[in-house]
Amino acid sequence: MKGIIFGDKHSFDDLDLILNSKEIPLPEPKTYTLDVPGADGQLDLSTALTDGYMTYKNRELQFNFTINKPFEQWEAVKSKVAAYLHGKTMNVYVEADEGYYYYGRCWISQQATKNPKATLTISVDADPYKYDDLDSTERTEWEGFDGNPLSWDAEITVADDTTTIVPPQKMRVVPTINVSDDMTLVYKTTRHALYEGDNIIPSVVLTENQADNTLEFLGTGTAIINFRGGVL
């Protein structure tokens, strides 16, 4: 039976819950407008500080369940579920939406008991984006900037001057760049020193724009571009 996986426990197999319904709304955009005296309308400053990219609030997921046990065992089931997830943060997998997971804080938000059935609702204060189940080093299928399938490998062999273009990302993400030897990264004409091991450069942000995703490496060795994407 398809259900919800909270952390490493399945709602039906491990928590004795039968999924009745689910609500997964889109996240609300973070908007900010300024009313300027003497001017028509308002100034929309929602993306003024984010290079034109919209940001979003957390979204609340709700999953309604019926217990898969006799009514007399309701309290025991509720206690088991509460002990495992009430107030805790974890990954939440919706089996009907394969390939992604949500991350947030879970709690039992509603409960109702009426013989012979008892129900409870688990809510999740989740991040705005749902995350790819696979990170960039694990994925083999990508969508290119033209919408067509693209072959791309997160591990790059660097020989003197090597450029790679990372596939477009719906969620802006700062990658971790692991290099086998010290080398230099050129990103939007700015040079950044890369040292053997993991490197995180906050100004290197992958987006849906090809210019943002063009990485030029100067040196010799291998570079692994590691990140986890996400979609709304």
Image (cartoon, helix red, strand yellow):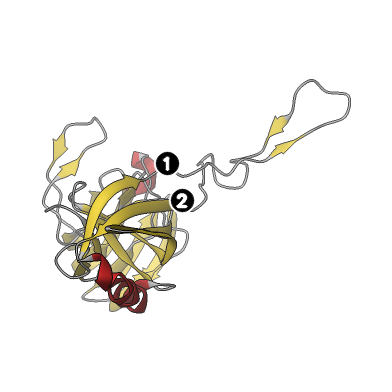
Check the image and report above or below for 40 versus 109.
above
Residue extending furthest toward the top: 40
Left-right relation of 151 to 107: left
Point 14% across, 60% down: residue? 138
**Residue 126, visible in the rendered structure:** no
Image location (x, y in percent) of residue 168: 30, 43
- Mark 2 and mark 1 in contact? Answer it, CB < 8 Å: yes
Which of the marked residues, 2 or 1, is nearer the chain's N terminus?
Answer: 1
Q: Nearer the viewer, residue 8 or 152?
A: 8
Q: Secondary structure at mark 2?
A: strand
Image location (x, y in percent) of residue 59: 46, 51
Q: Nearer the viewer, residue 59 or 172?
A: 59
Left-right relation of 140 to 37: left
Left-right relation of 87 to 20: right
Point 19% across, 47% down: residue? 96
Amino acid type of the residue tagged 2 in the rendering: Arg
Residue extending furthest toward the front: 115
Residue with the mark numbered 2: 59
As measured in the structure, the alpha-carbon distance from the residue carrying label 2 to the one carrying label 1 is 7 Å
Amino acid type of the residue tagged 1 in the rendering: Leu
Image location (x, y in percent) of residue 6: 27, 66
Q: Secondary structure at mark 1?
A: loop
Check the image and report above or below for 27 versus 223.
above
Residue with the mark numbered 1: 26
Image location (x, y in percent) of residue 225: 25, 62
Which quarter of the figure has residue 149? top left
Q: Nearer the viewer, residue 120 or 107?
A: 120
